[in-house]
Image: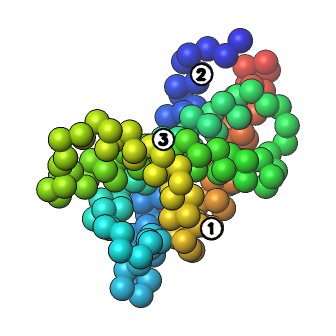
Amino acid sequence: MLSKNTFWINASFYWVISLICSISAYYILWLIMPNHYVFGTLYRMFLYHWEHPIQYISIICFSFGIIATIFTLKTKAQHQWKHTLVIALLTIIISSPIGGILWHLHDMQAGFFPNFWIEKLQGGISEGLLLGWLIILLSFPYNIIGIIASHYIIKYRLRLLEKQLKVTNG
C-alpha cells in the first residue's frame, strides 16, 4: 500500500528537480536562441507563454511530478525510454488544458475580459488540448532537452528509492 507521505515526498522531489532543470534550461536557451525564441508559437498568437514562462513551465513540472510519482511507485520495471515517452505524453495531455486556462487568464489580464469569462476559461481547456501539444512540439530544442532530463531524473529517483529499500530491508 502506497502511503500518502511516500507519494508527496516523491512528487515533491520530481516537482523541485524538474522545475530547477526546466527553468535553468529555459534561461540557457533564452541566452543562445535567436531572438530568445525558446517556446514555439502559432501565427497571430498572443505570446503570454513568452511573457510568463515560469508559470507555464511550473504547470508542466507539476503534472510531470504527479505522473512520474505514480509511475515510479506503482511499477517495478526497469525504467526505459519508452516509459519516459509515455510519461511525457501523459504530462502533455494533463498539462495542456491547464495551460489553456492560464493562457485565457493572461488574455483577460491584458484587457480582453468578456462578460462570459467562465465560458472563456472553459474554452481554454479545449483549446489547450487542441493546441498545447503543438506548441510543445514547436518548442525545439527545449522539448527534447526536457524529455532527456525527465528520463534521467526518473532513473536517478529510482536509484535513490532502490537504495532506500535496501537500507530499510537491510
Image quarter for residue 50? bottom left
* Residue at the extreme right of the image, as rendered: 77
- Residue occupying image coordinates x 80% and y 52%: 82
Whether residue 19 is visible to the viewer of this picture, yes or no, is: no
- Residue occupying image coordinates x 50% and y 64%: 135
**Is 48 situated above or below 158?**
below
Say whether disc 1 or disc 3 marks the residue closer to the N-terminus.
3
**Is 127 situated above or below 49?**
above
Q: Position of 98 compared to 167: left or right? A: left
Q: Which mark is residue 2?
A: none
* Few, some or many residues within 10 Å of mark 1 (<14, 14–19, 20+): few
- Between disc 1 and disc 2, the foreground one is 1
How far across and how far down the image is residue 67, in percent? Answer: 62, 37
Quadrant housing the N terminus: top right
Image quarter for residue 10? top right
Amino acid bearing label 3: Phe
* Few, some or many residues within 10 Å of mark 3 (<14, 14–19, 20+): many
Q: Position of 153 compared to 111: left or right? A: right
Say whether disc 2 or disc 3 marks the residue closer to the N-terminus.
2
Amino acid bearing label 2: Thr
Task: Look at the numbered disc 3 and give the secondary structure of its residue.
Answer: helix
Q: Which mark is residue 144?
A: 1
Task: Look at the numbered disc 2 and give the secondary structure of its residue.
Answer: helix
- Residue occupying image coordinates x 85% and y 37%: 77
Q: Which residue is mark 3?
A: 62
Whether residue 138 is visible to the viewer of this picture, yes or no, is: yes
Q: Which residue is mark 2?
A: 6
Image quarter for residue 98? top left
Tell me the distance, in whole angstroms, between the alpha carbons under discs 1 and 3: 18 Å
